[in-house]
Image (cartoon, rainbow, N blue to C red):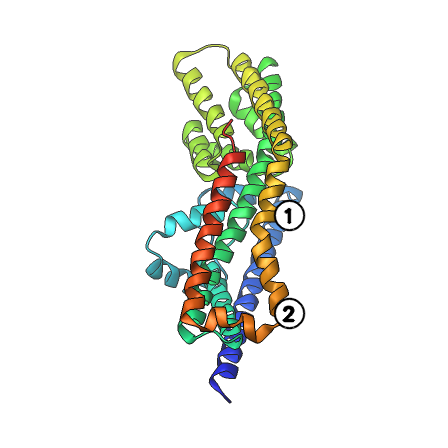
Amino acid sequence: MDAGTMAIFVGTAIALIAVALAAHGAAGASRRRVKGRAAVVRARWRGGQAAAPEAASVKRTVARGTFPGLDSLARRVVPRLSLLNLRLARTGRDIAAGTYLVVSGGLAAAAGGAAFLLGLSPAAAALAGLAAGVAVPHMVVGRMARRRIDRFTDIFPDALDLIVRGLRSGLPISETIATVGRDLADPVGHEFRLVADGVTLGRSLEDALWETATRLDTPEFKFFVIGLSIQRQTGGNLAETLANLSDILRRRRQMRLKIKAMSSEARASAYILGSLPFLMLGILLLVNFDYEMMLFTDPRGTTMVAAGLVCILMGIAVMYKMVKFEI
């Protein structure tokens, strides 16, 4: 067995092990959630009291994987593990840091082995695998977090309207927050249930809200927390303040959608221009593979590829800044 075949075999084995560990961890988390809900239903049926699964999760700031050894390894390897845990928590899924690192390592091994098989030097293949293992999971987690934040932002004005109606009917703010957690869909309902459970367990309302604001890291929710904190200190009509905030958030969303529609042509041009070099590379690889691989095997070719990638990334960054506006 030559070195290339061995590298592919080892990379594939590590990738399969990483996928199996991640699937096992996800299945274990799902089983734990089902058991927690079943315990709550049994306690209610028997007339007893039991903490809801969300209440128990208030005390848990870090997701725990099925394999504790991976989490302890992550605590020793990752220098700023709290930031990684916070980023994983924004996805709304029980992803442990150890599982994340195992998947990243498996992907890096598989990508490096594939790059070595395609003819890259061992050093270049190792760099390609390292880049894939770091960039791809980071981008996937970031996209999952952004999608969840976007869903939260779309539903959040409805939550404010529900709070306003509750306040105008005479309910306290803590009770209206609990009502939002029960009546609205996730992720808004889930986050407000965490706040309500934190208050039930003895935390102050502001501390529970600021913890959620830190985890979500969205300006809309921070506006809500700041407005509520100011009203609790200075007094005033909280229902009117939140009603105005709901109207402002809806106007901001309308403005963002309008900007997105007006900049759609520029974004489409950026997508086309950014993808053309890679499409041409794929076509040339199909037409004349050996000739095109000189770009990756010859030192002059790798230098040209690196310079081209830097220029492409600079152009994409400029076009991205041109069509992105802060509202």
What is the secondary structure assignment of the residue under circle 2?
helix
Q: Is residue 309 above or below residue 212?
A: below
Residue type (three-letter) at the residue carrying disc 1: Arg
**Residue indicated by mark 2:** 286
Seen from the viewer's position, the closer of residues 320 and 190 is 320
* Mark 1 / mark 2, whichever is N-terminal: 1
Give me the C-alpha separation between circle 1 and circle 2.
62 Å
Q: What is the crowding at mark 2: few (fewer than 14 residues within 10 Å), some, or many (at least 20)?
A: few
Q: Quadrant of residue 231?
A: top left
Q: Is residue 41 left or right of residue 81?
A: right
What is the secondary structure assignment of the residue under circle 1?
helix
Q: Residue at x 43, y 60 (%)?
A: 306
Q: Residue at x 54, y 33 (%)?
A: 192
Location of residue 62 in the rendering, given as x and y in whole percent from the top left corner: 43, 50
Residue type (three-letter) at the residue carrying disc 2: Leu
Q: What is the crowding at mark 1: few (fewer than 14 residues within 10 Å), some, or many (at least 20)?
A: some
Location of residue 87 in the rendering, given as x and y in whole percent from the top left corner: 46, 47
